[in-house]
Amino acid sequence: MLYILEKLGQNPQTSMKIFVRGLGLFVLGLGLIAVGYFSHYAWQMAGIIVLAIACAVAAWGYIGIFANRWYHILTRHNPERHK
């Protein structure tokens, strides 16, 4: 399990960038849904698709951040467990 956490959380800066990009896509998706509310419904469909992609991207970034934190919590008190 520690190997998986180490692999997923090996670069927290990149994971944070991925998470922030997912949040940006999320805001874009919400904007498209709002535009679709006032104009054609196709904008809402595009917004829902962008929203789904944004949730997946943000979740992937968050998993990397969380794995890094959890790995450091588990190996902080007992460094021999890492080996």
Image (tube, rainbow, N blue to C red):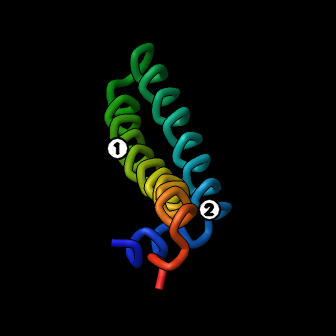
- Other-residue count near label 1 (Cα within 10 Å), few / some / many at <14 / 14–19 / ≥20: some
- Other-residue count near label 2 (Cα within 10 Å), few / some / many at <14 / 14–19 / ≥20: some
Q: Secondary structure at mark 2?
A: helix
Q: Which mark is residue 81?
A: none
**Residue at 55 percent of width and 40 percent of height:** 23
Q: Disc 2 versus disc 1: distance between alpha carbons?
A: 23 Å
In the image, 42: left or right of 16?
Answer: left
Along the line of sight, the residue nearer the viewer: 20 or 1: 1
The x, y position of residue 69, in whole percent, is: 54, 55
**Residue at 36 percent of width and 29 percent of height:** 44
- Observer-side mark, 2 or 1, equals 2
Q: Secondary structure at mark 1?
A: helix
Along the line of sight, the residue nearer the viewer: 77 or 72: 77
Report if residue 61 is visible in the image: no
**Residue at 52 percent of width and 47 percent of height:** 22
Along the line of sight, the residue nearer the viewer: 38 or 77: 77
Outermost residue on the bottom side: it is 83
Residue identified by numbered label 2: 12
Three-letter code, disc 2? Pro
In the image, 16: left or right of 74?
Answer: right
In the rendered view, tell whether residue 74 sits above or below residue 38. Answer: below
**Mark with earlier residue (2, 1):** 2
**Residue at 57 percent of width and 60 percent of height:** 15
The x, y position of residue 39, in whole percent, is: 43, 19
Along the line of sight, the residue nearer the viewer: 70 or 58: 70
> In terms of image quadrants, where is residue 60?
bottom left
Q: Tell me the quarter of the image containing the N terminus.
A: bottom left
Residue identified by numbered label 1: 52
